[in-house]
Amino acid sequence: MKGICRVVVGTLLFVMLSFTIFTGVNQAAVKSFKDVPTTHSNYKAIQYMAERGYIGGYPDGNFRPQELISRKHVAALLDKVLKLPQPTSTKAKFYDVPKNHPYYSSIMKLSEAGIVSGGPDGRFNPDAPVTRIQMAKVLDLAFDLHMTTQNAFYDVYPDHWGYVHANALYSSGVAKGYQGEFLPNESVTRAHYAEFLYRAMLVRDARPAGNAMTKGKAWDLSNRIPYLIEQTMRKGQTNGQPYADIKMELSKYATKDVVDNTLVNYYAKACMECYNQALPVLRMEPLVRFNFTQPDANTLHVKTIEFQNGISTGGFVDYTFKKQNSHWKLASFTYTPAGTKNFEFTVDEAKKVIEAEYKSYNYKEVVIKYVTKTQQIELDPVTDAPYTFDQYVFNAETEYGRYKVHFNASDGLMQ
């Protein structure tokens, strides 16, 4: 009788769980789901997850790929994939996830790792569906994706709370969106979550072993941390907050010296109606000029450039980041406007920049051909001393026609 009860209970649990977590599965015994044929766009990802015992289907042999995935199932699956340690706290963190909740352990593990969070009401909402932007945040933090792209999607603007996460997914090839949009508020299906998680795992597995700093991570820090600092100050200005009110938030992203002695000076002079960036915005600049050194495990020096964008003068960027309590923070930065000392771009470097610019606007077929160059004269923005530089002329041939591009070798301005 006890054996029969165990079978019944086990069957009921199997039906209740959208994603069944296995502890040991014979990969050879895994079969395709009846509703996920080999022609299904997400077949490879779903099969990959099933073969490794991360996901399961229903007793009728279906996977139900179009069903929405809930927050608790995202936590359970990520817990299995990441192999997180047991939570150190013995106290329940969310009102709606008590210690006897079947997903308590997984949710607490991810919460302690800083990957998931609840709402301001202290609830986790475990049964709620996951939106695409929430998924972006979870995968970005779980797999340390690299934000090496800015403004990847039209509908995730710089003031959007998920901006860095959506751009990190795009940069890493995990999510490309649809016709320039990310559709952040749409709910995620089981099939799509399996696909996004599969791609994130491939990104992780393709990285070199060890903790050595890579260009991708250095580029990510040079984008992500300045952005987070900028947004904190921008929101503070918009809300009319004194600097003292945002110092604690800024201290998450910058060292005490930068917070106390550098950012405070900018904040006091910033225009509330016409907020100007205090820090550079890197787009494709690191493709041509980006150097980093790591004198020790907790220090990173970055040297790069920022192009002139028609509004601000291009210049040389120097960053120092320090790791404190396992978190990288901005420790110092300098910005030197291009002038008498300028970029002196080569023709090949200019071609690379122009091609990347066109592709950032979804041009697929781009061929950049050098035509000629002329000499131009400008004044140094700091000293007013005149200087001469090359202005290159290119033809950009695309699927939509040919365009003429003028490119300043001095500061990267394109016209």
Image (spheres, rainbow, N blue to C red):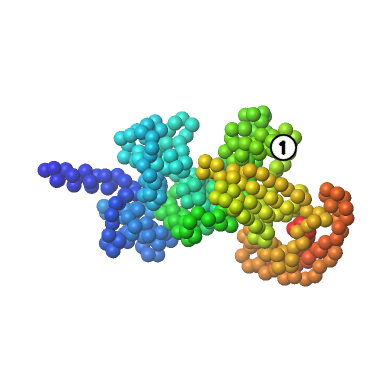
* Quadrant in the picture for residue 340: bottom right
Out of 281 and 34, give the one closest to the viewer: 281
x then y, percent, for residue 153: 59, 51
x then y, percent, for residue 63: 34, 54
At label 1, the amino acid type is Tyr
> Which residue corresponds to the image point at 66% horizontal and 67% vertical from the top-left?
366
* Helix, strand or loop under label 1: helix
Answer left or right for 327 relative to 94.
Answer: right
> Which residue corresponds to the image point at 37% horizontal and 57% vertical from the top-left?
49
Answer left or right for 296 relative to 202.
Answer: right
Answer left or right for 260 relative to 63.
Answer: right
Answer left or right for 138 relative to 180.
Answer: left
Location of mark 1 (residue): 266
x then y, percent, for residue 357: 67, 59
Which quarter of the rendered picture does the C terminus lie within? bottom right
Out of 13 and 147, give the one closest to the viewer: 147
